Image (tube, rainbow, N blue to C red):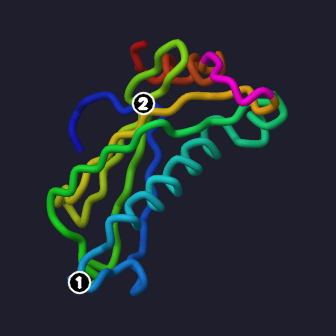
C-alpha cells in the first residue's frame, strides 16, 4: 500500500470461491461489485453502523462505481486481501477507494461515489456530521 492517508481504512481477507470464477478462469467482473459491497458494509459496521444510520432515518446509496482491472485473479490465487477507505467527503457526497491484492501484487483498484438519503423522503441529504468528524480525525481532508 502507498503512504497516502487512508482515513477509516478497513481490510477483509476474501477467500475465492469456485462460483466466483468465469469460463475464462478468472474472477468474474460482477464478483468485484459484490466484494465492494462487502467492504462497504464492513466499513460502515466499524465506523458508522447501519443501525445508527437507520435510527436517524439515513440510508447510504452508491451513485457510481469505477473498477480498474490491472491483472486477473484466479481460483489458484486462493485469497485476496481487500481494503477500502473513504478518500474524500463533500457536503453531500462521499468517495470510497478500494484495492484488491494477491500477496504484494495490486490486481484491481476501484472507486465509488455515494450519498446519503433521508430514508422516509428518499431525498439526498448532507453527509452525517459523525462521519465527517471521524474522517477528519483520521487525517481526511474535506
**Residue shown at 29% from the left, 50% from the top:** 67
Up the image or down, 90 lies above or below 17; here it is above
SS at badge 1: loop
Observer-nearest of 24 and 47? 24
**Quadrant occupied by the C terminus:** top left
Up the image or down, 10 lies above or below 52; here it is below
**Residue shown at 38% from the left, 61% from the top:** 32
Q: Could you say which quadrant of the image residue 60 lies in?
A: top right
**Residue shown at 55% from the left, 44% from the top:** 43
Observer-nearest of 76 and 104? 76
Residue 28 x/y as whole percent: 32, 72
Residue 25: mark in rendering: 1
Residue 95: mark in rendering: 2
User: What are the residue bounds of the magenta stretch?
Assistant: 121-126
Residue 23 x/y as whole percent: 27, 86
**Mark 2 or mark 1: which comes first in sequence?**
1
SS at badge 2: strand
Residue 54 x/y as whole percent: 79, 37
Residue 61 falls left or right of residue 140:
right
Amino acid at each position: 500500500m502507498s503512504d497516502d492517508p487512508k482515513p477509516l481504512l478497513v481490510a477483509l481477507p476474501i477467500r475465492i470461491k469456485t462460483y466466483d470464477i468465469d469460463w475464462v478462469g478468472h474472477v468474474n467482473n460482477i464478483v468485484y461489485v459484490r466484494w465492494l459491497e462487502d467492504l462497504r458494509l464492513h466499513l460502515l459496521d466499524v465506523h458508522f453502523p447501519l443501525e445508527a444510520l437507520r435510527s436517524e432515518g439515513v440510508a447510504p446509496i452508491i451513485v457510481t462505481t469505477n473498477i480498474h482491472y490491472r491483472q486477473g485473479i484466479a481460483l489458484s490465487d486462493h485469497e485476496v486481501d481487500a481494503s477500502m477507505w473513504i478518500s474524500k467527503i463533500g457536503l453531500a457526497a462521499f468517495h470510497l477507494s478500494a484495492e484488491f491484492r494477491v500477496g504484494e501484487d495490486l490486481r484491481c483498484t476501484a472507486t465509488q461515489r455515494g450519498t446519503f438519503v433521508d430514508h422516509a423522503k428518499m431525498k439526498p441529504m448532507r453527509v452525517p456530521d459523525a462521519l465527517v468528524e471521524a474522517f477528519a480525525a483520521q487525517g481526511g481532508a474535506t
